[in-house]
Amino acid sequence: MRSFQIISLLIFIIFYGLITIGAFQNIKTTVNGKYRQKVVWFFWVYTVLLIFSFIYLYIYPNEPKGATNYVLYFFYNTILFIDVVVKIPLSITFLFYLFFSRKNKSKTILFSGLILSFCLATLIIYGTILGNQNIKVNQVELNFSNLPPNFSQYKIVQISDIHLGSLLEFSNLLEKTAININKINPDLILFSGDLVNNFSNETIRWENTFNDINAKGNSFSILGNHDYGNYSRWPDEESKQNNFEGIIKSHKKLGFTLLRNENVVIKMGNDSIFLIGVENWGHPPFPQYANLDSAMFNIPENAFKILMTHDPAHWEAQIAGKKKIELTVSGHTHGLQLGIKPAGIPFSLAYLTRKNWSGLYQSDNSYLYVNTGLGTVGIPWRIDMPPEITVFTLKGIEID
């Protein structure tokens, strides 16, 4: 284990220990009568089980890179996250009680901590059970002066970041996605990467669902950072390569034409546009496998171009102001699966790590759209950051 990981683990242990003690003191002070002993007993048994589970799953004998049962890990991550989120307000309000309210014996501040913790836990549970299933269809109209006439009113659907290994067997997210896409009846479907978490076998039971999606035969995809198997520990390089080849084959089985640093011509009558698909490119530690020059080989300079690249950082680093590409579609960010809308303006903590985290961006005559994805990773929740289907309607601008 690297020194950074050890230091991070020690910081978490100290932090968790402090909020656990604070939460315990809050509960012990707040709960009176015959139930106090039972509540205290439950608190410590639950906390000890949570700690031992953490050691077993993350330290010894297991580790996240060796995980194959993502549902187990994501379930535990959710429980641990709820535990931490609940204990923080309990600890803070106990400190306020200790320094400000203890003398007059008012427990109002303690009860407010309990109420806040309950509300936060309810919100997380909602995001885990319902918030990650309520698909939002975003309509985006784009006007271009150089759009070939036959492509006016051309409809493109973008989906991204499905993470099939995170879906439970009873999830109907993909069925609802297929129904929505078929209602839209698009001319083109673009999938912008992260089909799986790590393993090719994550796709097996979903093939029929994907085959129900009708896109007039035009469905294209690219790879995301999770599609290379880099987040697992492999016995040897051959095993990793075999898994990767399985993921490549899965795209075809699911009805997608996979683009790997290459382009295709999309025709409508006598008019055509170019669709470019590159492999993953992101700032370290994310892999940089994209070769944009190779992908754009033989495309005329004045041609109308659409680019699929998984990580929106690629657009800012190598495309905006540097390449003549009318529309770039990306995913990757998930909007951190958590957002709020103060004054109706979408906001996510993802903004602290990248400028382009969700929605439409523009640089001169080049657009970027960041889709926040369908699936989940890490914690299987979505709070005010619903699974997204994006519908682009292309329109031409008449120039006098």
Image (cartoon, rainbow, N blue to C red):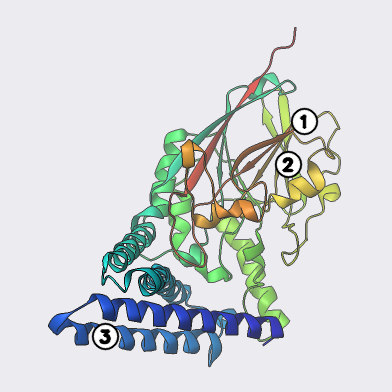
Residue mark closest to the camera, 3 vs 2: 3
Could you tell me which residue is drawn at 70 percent across and 34 percent down?
Answer: 362
Count of marks, rendered view: 3
Question: Circle 1: is it few (<14), some (14-19), or many (20+) Cα within 10 Å?
Answer: few
Quadrant position of the N terminus in the picture? bottom right
Residue mark closest to the camera, 1 vs 3: 3
Quadrant position of the C terminus in the picture? top right
- Asked which secondary structure carries label 2, the reply is strand
Q: Position of residue 146 (x, y in %)?
A: 75, 22
Question: Circle 2: is it few (<14), some (14-19), or many (20+) Cα within 10 Å?
Answer: some
Q: Position of residue 87 (x, y in %)?
A: 39, 73
- Asked which secondary structure carries label 1, the reply is loop
Could you tell me which residue is drawn at 79 percent across and 49 percent down?
Answer: 317
Identity of the amino acid at label 2? Val
Q: To which quarter of the image does residue 90 belong?
A: bottom left
Q: Which residue is mark 3?
A: 40
Identity of the amino acid at label 1? Asp
Question: Circle 3: is it few (<14), some (14-19), or many (20+) Cα within 10 Å?
Answer: some
- Asked which secondary structure carries label 3, the reply is helix
Residue 44 relative to residue 244: left or right: left
Foreground residue among 323 and 261: 323
* Sequence-first tag of 1 and 3: 3
Q: Which residue is mark 2?
A: 264
* Sequence-first tag of 3 and 2: 3
Could you tell me which residue is drawn at 42 percent across and 46 percent down?
Answer: 135
Residue 350 relative to residue 137: left or right: right
Identity of the amino acid at label 3? Val
Q: Which residue is mark 1?
A: 364
Could you tell me which residue is drawn at 41 percent across and 80 percent down?
Answer: 20
Spatial distance from mark 1 to mark 3, Cα to Cα?
Answer: 62 Å
